[in-house]
Image (cartoon, grey):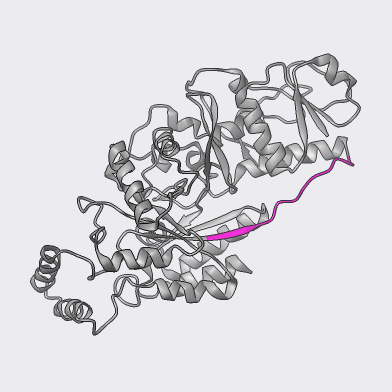
Amino acid sequence: MLLIYTSNATSRFRYIAGLMVGDLLGIDFKVTSDPAVFRRHEGPGLAYSDEEFTGVPRILPAGLLTECTIRVQGVAATRFDGVPVIFQANTPGSALPFDPFAAGFYMVTRYEEYLPFTKDKYGRFPATESIALQGNFLDLPVVHHWAEMIGRMLVRVYPDIQRRERKYRYLPTVDVDHAFCYRGRTMKRTLGGAARSLFNGRIGEVAQRFRVLAGMAGDPFDTFDYIRRVLDPYDLQPLFFILFADYGGDDNNVRVNSKAFHRLVRSLDHHQGVGVHPSLSSNKHYLKLHAECEGLGRLLSRQVVISRQHFLKLSVPKTYRALNQLGITADYSMGYATHAGFRAGIAIPFPFFDVARDMVTPLVVHPITLMDVTMKDYLRLTCDQSLELTAKFIRTVKSVNGEFVSLWHNESLAPAGRWLGWRRVFEEMVKMAST
């Protein structure tokens, strides 16, 4: 049993020590603030303190974990052993030239998102404002690397220290923004869509629309059987996040009272694999979020407990507080729409810590690594380039025994249209991530 000494065992420190030492390193530990108890301890020890203890490795605290306020930290990235680090501490006697616990806390809690920043057009925290992108380490799960630095330092001093190994996991997820291309829509939207196609000279779309509505052809966005066929050989159970919102603005799924839509959603709820995809407008209106969760729950005859924000519209801590209030236990929104990578610097699920309230919450955050729309529309990559990027991130997550969460949309797997050719990317991604 590792005993960690700190003069002030704050909620912040206990949280990040549990995540980095307990979860990432797999080391059983306890924390004490009694120096006499620490000196009497006969097993492995680690001092997170300004005070030195003979024969015990020490990490010098940067101060972040003993504060009770939120303030600009003046964080800048440098490198140590080839790895980007923040919260440098070049003090003699410190086992590491930075504070990995403060660094990990800053990243995982999304501390920087509590500070003033310039929002993007959807009101989101942009990747360009993050220390990860500015420090050129968004593509690295740096918290894992920082934890490993602690682990290697402990092994040098205590070669017999016991560690549990984590196992890599792949979790495919699908957002259902538009369950169908033509089915399940009001007559007004159907006629309006047909008129737009005619006006733009796309006669084929008009013919296809009415063949689908007449039952003579399948809806191009109804790719759910295809998704199952790709995933079944690997015994993968996907999660589907359903936009269950009234039509308006950027929230334009099919009618929530459509019978075809209801049949689809119930059929997707295999092993309770359906979650809510809160609308863009619900981020500002709690009652709307409540109504969407309640409506989907009634359809499924159970409480909905997983979610992902539409457009990845995540406002820390507001969004997570609202989800906690509704009984959501896991969220899959931790990522950037514009960039692939590790928004929180970590590739495993973790409990959300509300910095402003200084508390661990029941909500578990599952970081996503990359999204189909990111590659095609934001980064403007070809299918081959997307496969290269995907392979890179899969290797990265596997190297730290993390959880690789991919985000696709049912419509991006349509057999024709603007996503033509992307089925190959999806199929190869599933194969690489599963083997």
- Estimate the x, y position of residue 263 in percent, counting from the top left: 34, 67
Where does the C terminus fall, quadrant-wise? bottom right
Residue 121 visible in image: no
Residue 194 falls in image quadrant: bottom left
- Name the residue located 37 percent from the left edge and 31 percent from the top edge: 117
Q: Reply yes or no: does residue 233 show up in magenta.
A: no
Occupied quadrant, residue 222: bottom left
Q: Residue visible at 31% across and 77% down?
A: 416
Using residue 319 as the reference point, say whether residue 155 is left or right of it: right
Q: Tell which residue pokes out farthest to the bottom in this image.
A: 216
Judging depth in this view, the residue of 78 and 377 nearest the camera is 377
**Vertical comparison of 122 with 374: above or below:** above
**Magenta highlight range:** 159-171
User: Horizontally, is 148 left or right of 386 in the view?
Assistant: right
Q: Residue furthest front?
A: 301
Query: Residue 301: percent from the left, percent from the top?
Result: 40, 55
Q: Nearer the viewer, residue 186 or 19?
A: 186
Disc tally is 0
Q: Is residue 8 above or below residue 109?
A: above
Q: Residue 13 appears in which quarter of the rendering?
A: top right
Residue 167: say if magenta. yes
Provide the major secondary structure of the magenta segment.
Answer: loop
* Residue 299 image offset from top left, x and y in percent: 35, 57
Please state if 250 lies on the left or on the right of 59 as rendered: left
Q: Position of residue 201 (x, y in %)?
A: 11, 75
- Which residue occupies 38% across, 62% down? 376
Q: Which quadrant is the N terminus positioned in?
A: top right
Q: Is residue 239 visible?
A: yes
Asked if residue 366 is positioned above or below residue 87 in the image, the reply reads: below
